[in-house]
Image (cartoon, coloured by chain):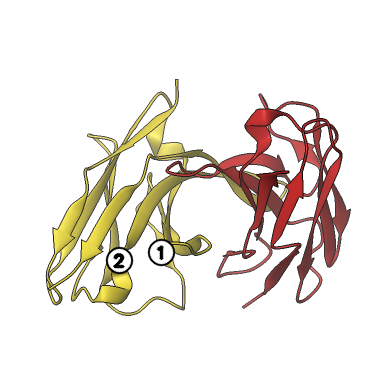
Chain colours: A red, B yellow
Amino acid sequence: DIQMTQSPSSLSASVGDRVTITCRASQSISIFVNWYQQKPGNAPQVLIYAASSLQRGVPSRFSGSGSETDFTLTISSLQPEDFATYYCQQSYSIPLTFGQGTRLEIK
Amino acid sequence: QVQLVQSGAEVKRPGASVKVSCKASGFTFSRYTIHWVRQAPGQRPEWMGWIHAGNGNTKYSPNLQDGVTFTRDTYATIAYLELASLSSEDTAVYYCARGVAVTGNYYFDYWGQGTLVTVSS
C-alpha cells in the first residue's frame, strides 16, 4: 500500500494567516493526489483534485501543488470556516489511501 | 442537485450482519462508480472499494476482511453495502461517495451523510 504522511498533524493559526500543509507519499504517484476538508460530524469534502485543480465551488484561497512524492495544500488567508481537519488521498494505486489528517485549530 | 442519502444508524451484536443503503439522485446513476469509505472514531478515512452502478463490476480493497459485499439496484438508483460477521472493529461511520475520474486521477466529489454502525454486545 502507498503510505501518505501529512505534516504537521495539528496546527494552530489565526484568521488571516497563510497556512501550508504537506503530504508525502511513500513512492512516486505523479499528480494523483486529492485534498479534502472534514468538519466534525460531516463527510469529507473535496477541495483540490489532481494535485492542483480547484474543485468547482471551492474558494480560491485554497490551492495545491506538488508532484511525484511531495505535495502541499495552501490556504492563503484563513477564514473562520476553514478550521477543520484536512486529508490528502492518493489515487495512484489500489487500495486508495488517505493521510492521517491535519487538524487546523484556532490560535 | 446531486445527492447521496444514506440509511440510518445501526446497532448490532458481534457476529450479526448489516446492510447500509445509499440512495442517489440528481445525476445519471449508471454512469458512475459508487465508493464506500469508512472512518473509525478518531481515525483517518479508509477506502473499502467501489461498485460501478451501470455494469455492477466491483473492486474491493485487498485489506478488507471477508464478508463485505457491494450491490446496487439500478432502477431504484440505490447502492448497498453489506457487512457480515460483524466485530467491534467494524464500528465506524460508513460513507458512500461518487467517484470521478479526471485524466486517470480518481476522487470523490459527492458524499453521503454517513451511517454510524456500532457493534457492541
* Residue in the image at 69% along x and 33% along y: A55
Give neighbour class at mark 1: few <14, some 14-19, many 20+ (Cα, 10 Å): some
* Residue in the image at 82% along x and 61% along y: A30
Secondary structure of residue under mark 1: loop
Tell me: A79 left or right of A74: left
Secondary structure of residue under mark 2: loop
Can residue B81 be spotted in the picture? no
Give neighbour class at mark 2: few <14, some 14-19, many 20+ (Cα, 10 Å): many
Q: Where does label 1 land, which residue?
A: B40
* Residue in the image at 67% along x and 35% along y: A82
Q: Where does label 2 land, which residue?
A: B91
In percent of width and height, residue A7 lies at 76, 63
Can residue B120 be spotted in the picture? yes
In percent of width and height, residue A67 lies at 87, 58
Do tag 2 and tag 1 residues touch (Cβ < 8 Å)? yes
Name which residue type carries label 1.
Ala
Label of residue B28 in the image: none
Name which residue type carries label 2.
Thr
Front one among B29 and A104: A104
In percent of width and height, residue A26 lies at 75, 76
User: Compared to A40, does A57 lie above or below?
Assistant: above
In percent of width and height, residue A51 lies at 79, 49
